Amino acid sequence: MDALANLANGLMSALSLEMLLVCFLGVLVGQITGVLPGIGPTGAMAILLPLSFGMGPGAGLIMLAGIYYGAMYGGSITSILVNLPGEAASLVTTLDGYQMARKGRAGAALSIAAIGSWIAGTLAIVGLMFFAPLLANAALAFGPPEFFALGVFGLIILSNLTGGSFGKSFLMVIIGLMLSTVGVDLVTGEDRLTFNVLELSKGIDLVPVVMGLFGLAEIFSVALTPYQNNKMIKIKLKEMYPNKQETKRSIWPIIRGTFVGFPMGLLPGPAGFMSTLISYRLEKRLSRHPEEFGKGAIEGVAGPESANNAASTSAMIPFLALGFPFSPPTALLLGGLLIHGITPGPMFISQHGDLFWLVVASMYIGNVMLLILNLPLVGVFASLTKVPIKILMPIITGIMFIGAYSINNSIFDLWIMFVFGVVGFIMKYCDYEPAPLVVGLVLGQMFEEGLRQGLIMTEGSFLMFFERPITAILLGISILIVLWNVFKRFLPFKKASLTDEQEDAGIKT
Amino acid sequence: MKIMKLKKLFWALGLISIILAGCNSNQTSESTQANSKSASTETKLDFPKKSINLIVPFAAGGSTDTVGRAIAESAQKYIGKSMVVVNRAGASGTIGASETANAAGDGYTVGLVTGTTLTMQPLVKQLNYNMDDFKFISSVVYNPLLLVVDGKSKINSVQDLINESKGKTLKVGHPGVGTVNDLAHTAFFNAAGIKTSNVPFKANNESIAAIIGGHIDIAAVHPMESAEYIKNGQLKVLGIFTPERLDLFPDVPTIAEELEKAGIDFEFKDHDFSAWYYLAVPKDTPDEIVTYLQENMKKVLADPDFKKNAETLKMTVKAIEGEEIKTQLNGMKEVNQKMIDKFGVGKQ
């Protein structure tokens, strides 16, 4: 009950006018950066960081955290309406969200995304509140071999995310893996595949690639289709919100998404993005009508949108309870606290309890603000689809370029985005899915780093990986999935007896 | 009516995006204009007329970035125009350093560069800049390195470490070839005669997490990243890589002291392995602008707010100027070259 008393105290101070204002400012900026394609929370937080110097540590942290989780709400909007992910973590939302919009269910998709985000965000704060120190220590058990195993597991499960041709998906994963090797070699410090381009030595960033493959490619193909005037679907008010069936179908995906996202957020790497992929995969497997996925299944919006919110909230746990910023946005939160002489770490909750509970309380409030901000605006956003494409697309293109530039202030990133835009456009016409390429790019880094760090740790003995329980379990499951898919055709029994995990492999034989 | 509303919405969206972008982007087009002006010698210095970009060669949120933002924050008071932090991360700071060296020499681009990007990276990598491509305004702060082990380990001193690691290979958290940590590790472990294998990590706080999690044994890390864990007993500090003990950590012995106790004379005992930060401008920047910046940076570094910020970051403010910087950098370069020749640093 201690926690509840502390929370009550936190709520008291979080409800003061100043705190409410900074919280609102934070979530509003977050919402906007989420909506604008390419401009992610990291950029917005970096811009507002100096503003937080002048505030107290509490107010500063509330504002910066608000931007972070607020962005997870906004990201779905352009994904659903125009098939352009507002930020990387909303990429999978384009798969079904956009199809829903084309069927006139944009309002429903937007509402479900907002409600799912709210439920997941709130549940994750409860988890943060009660289990922060405990979970933080569990995250420490993840060393390099564990990350390697996680990378292998992810590659096997996620390689055929969208369920197209296996051969094509696998090819894309491999190209993604190859792209992830560009940049400075972690061990020797030598440049790999950079062709003496200094900019390439930092590797290929995720955001310009995603913006190019999904965003620019979409814009190119829209530009090529013959111009059709006002073929846009009219949206009636009662179609603005989800109907009974859609609501019912969304409940479990939202809850499952929360439970997928929460543990992901505890680990380093692009947790929000990864959690959406896993949630999407899970929903597709569990669904009674998997054929609807990719054609406008509400579960494909509800699950991933909940997962990324749960992940962004639980990412606060290793940060607040251990002081480890596992992602760029939490690194900025750290910067905001350091300047006030407060170092988050193992002592943070006991030494700065008031601050911890203030932030937790503000996150409850911020999530409610975002829900209020989003639901009535569903109609406004949904009517964006009525704007003629010739007006909408140039504006979005401009915003995307600004966004991609703002991450590293680098013109080179714009070139990367452009190249991947052209590549994505060609892939689209040849019927190749870009999502597996992104999976390869992201997991390739985790895979390589974990493997090489791990092998140095064990002095080259791969067998020692299996002496570590988490690694052994993850690798064991991965091996079973592969074996199962190779040998299942020789076995007499049928699909009904497959377990979820084995089905998750999604490898068609 | 609806269309009117939508138009307004778009204007609003557009405006927001312009504001967002404007806050972050540098005004290169303007700077070329200003360049031609400042080139013609003016009698009275008309500088600065607009905001100055401060290139920080590491990602937002890190320790270098926080130093940069603290400088920018205080600089505004004295320069009268704002200083905008531009993060140009990647390749151990060389991307940002290269950008600074190759910017227009009009004073509107100032770079925060580190000692290793100037004196180590050019020795082990082919880069399009070297030390002589800069004019230096001042040094800013230095960020020392502490040698830390897991708080639960039996090792309490360098002597213990040497005894315990006989016949073993220590796993060392290593944030990259040619970093200050790399240099400090090489010098220390060679002097102590300890066998090591370098486990690469992208950042020091990943090394710290791996030490506490029991995945690796030891690493040299900065106080800002490790202070809380040391206070909490999760990390134990064995020594500091500076020639003398620091006011911020009076109880922490220097590595040379500790090695002496173990009967070893540390070859690099007079060398400071800290990460040093300097403010630099491209070499064709007019002297009067450099002098102007120097005068004002002196005030920034003496500013109590800045001092306090640096202290909370566990860094020590130290202003060295002009020729003295060159002497210091040349000293660093000499030591680095020695380590490359002797131990093969940077050539794995």
Image (tube, coloured by chain):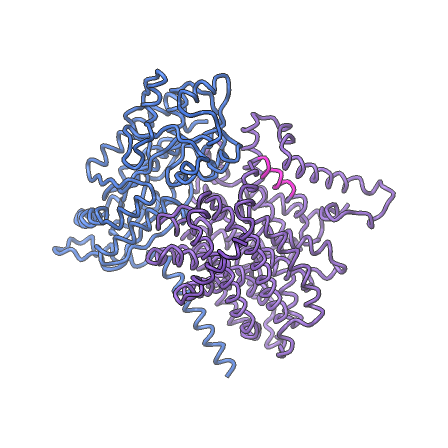
Chain colours: A purple, B blue
Magenta stretch holds residue A237: no
Q: Is residue B122 visible?
A: yes
Picture quadrant where residue A145 is located:
top right
Most foreground residue, A396 or B329: B329
Q: Taking the image as drawn, is residue A445 in sight? A: no
Image position of B152 with respect to A331: above or below: above
Residue B288: percent from the left, percent from the top?
16, 49
Image: B172 above or below A72: above
Residue at x 64%, y 44% (from the top left corner): A155
Q: Residue furthest right?
A: A492
Towards the viewer: A171 or A270: A270
Residue most extreme to the left: B43
- Residue B103 location (% of width, % of height): 31, 48
* Left or right: A60 in relation to A314: left
Q: Residue at x 69, y 63 (%)?
A: A297
Residue span colored magenta: A145-153
